[in-house]
Each structure stands twice: as structure tokens, then as C-alpha cells.
Image: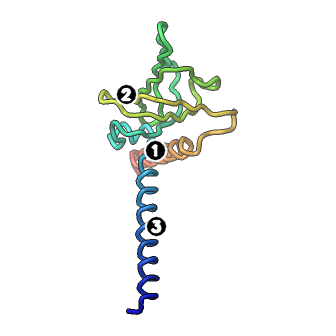
Amino acid sequence: MHPIRKKRLTIVLFLLVGLGIAVGLATYALRQNISLFYDPSQIAAGDAPQDVRIRAGGMVEENSVKRDPESLRVRFRVTDFESSVVMEYTGILPDLFAEGQGVVATGRMGPDGVFVADEVLAKHDENYMPPEVKDSLEKAAARAEKNTAQSIPEY
């Protein structure tokens, strides 16, 4: 092989190996930061992994918010009107956090089945609902409607 061609081939091979390493490192870094969304029905069914950072959301159940008077810890239930999950958060909740409102929380599932949130986000106006929560509620309503239609006997 001609020396110039050999030199070019070597350079191209080094560039390809370097590019492969860069893509591999970027993929590894992004995989560490991904947080998938789970609705309360998926969490209740055991689909959500434990000790992995995930997002969960739904509507805050009425009369479920319990505040610890000695600290900033708050426990509340989030539902998709089919199942519900207990969430615990330590910190100052958003001003728009309220019972009957949509929330999305980022955190981890604990071994006791309680979702321990690192961050809680509440909707920012009366008309907005987080897309994940909206899709989750629509799916739960469709499943409930399907179950109701199946349970009605035909004549």
C-alpha cells in the first residue's frame, strides 16, 4: 500500500474510533439523566422501578394533604381516578399546589410503596394541565368506560 494512502487510512480510522467513543460517552451520560413518567395506575401495578429517578403525576386527592407541624414534610395522595399513590415531599410546595389540582413530581419509589419526591411542580393556571397528566387521565377514563360498557348486560 502506498504510504500516503496508509497515512490517510490511519487518520480516518482514528477519527471513526474517536467519534464512536464520543457517541458512546454521550449516550451513557444521557441515560443517567433520563426520568420516565408513570401514572398512579402504573405505580400501583408495580410497573415503576424502585430507587430509580422517575416522574409521577396526577390529581391531588381531596382531603389527602397532611403537613408535619414540626417540619416542611408533606404527605398527599395523587390519583388518576383509577388508582392512587402516596407521595411525600420535604420542602416548600409551589404556591399553586392545591387539592384537586394537577401535579407532576420527580423522585424515587421507596421500598414501602411511598413516592419520595425531590421536586413537585403544579400547574400554572386554571386551563393548563401537564401533558403527561392529561394523557394519563384520558387513558384511565377510557379504561373505566370500557369496563363499564363490558359490565352492562345486553338484552
Query: Image point 66% across, 39% down: which residue?
Result: 128
Q: Position of residue 54 (x, y in %)?
A: 43, 40
Q: Height in image: 10 above or below 106?
A: below
Q: Looking at the image, which residue sits at the far bottom? A: 1
Question: Which secondary structure lies at badge 3?
Answer: helix
Q: Looking at the image, which residue sits at the far top? A: 70
Which residue is labeled 1 in the image? 35
Query: Image point 42% across, 56% down: which residue?
Result: 25
Which residue is labeled 2 in the image? 114
Q: What amino acid is at disc 2?
A: Val
Which residue is labeled 3 in the image? 19
Question: Which secondary structure lies at badge 2?
Answer: loop
- Between 150 and 68, the residue placed more toward the observer is 68
Query: Image point 52% across, 20% down: which residue?
Result: 91
Q: Position of residue 126 (x, y in %)?
A: 69, 33
Between discs 1 and 3, the one toward the N terminus: 3
Between discs 1 and 2, the one toward the N terminus: 1
Q: Height in image: 31 above or below 21?
A: above
Q: What amino acid is at disc 1?
A: Ser
Q: Position of residue 140 (x, y in %)?
A: 47, 43
Tags 1 and 2 touching, CB below 8 Å: no
Examine the image and state in which quarter residue 129 appears.
Answer: top right
Q: CA distance from mark 2 to mark 3?
A: 43 Å
Q: What amino acid is at disc 3?
A: Leu
Between discs 2 and 3, the one toward the N terminus: 3
Q: Position of residue 79 (x, y in %)?
A: 47, 32
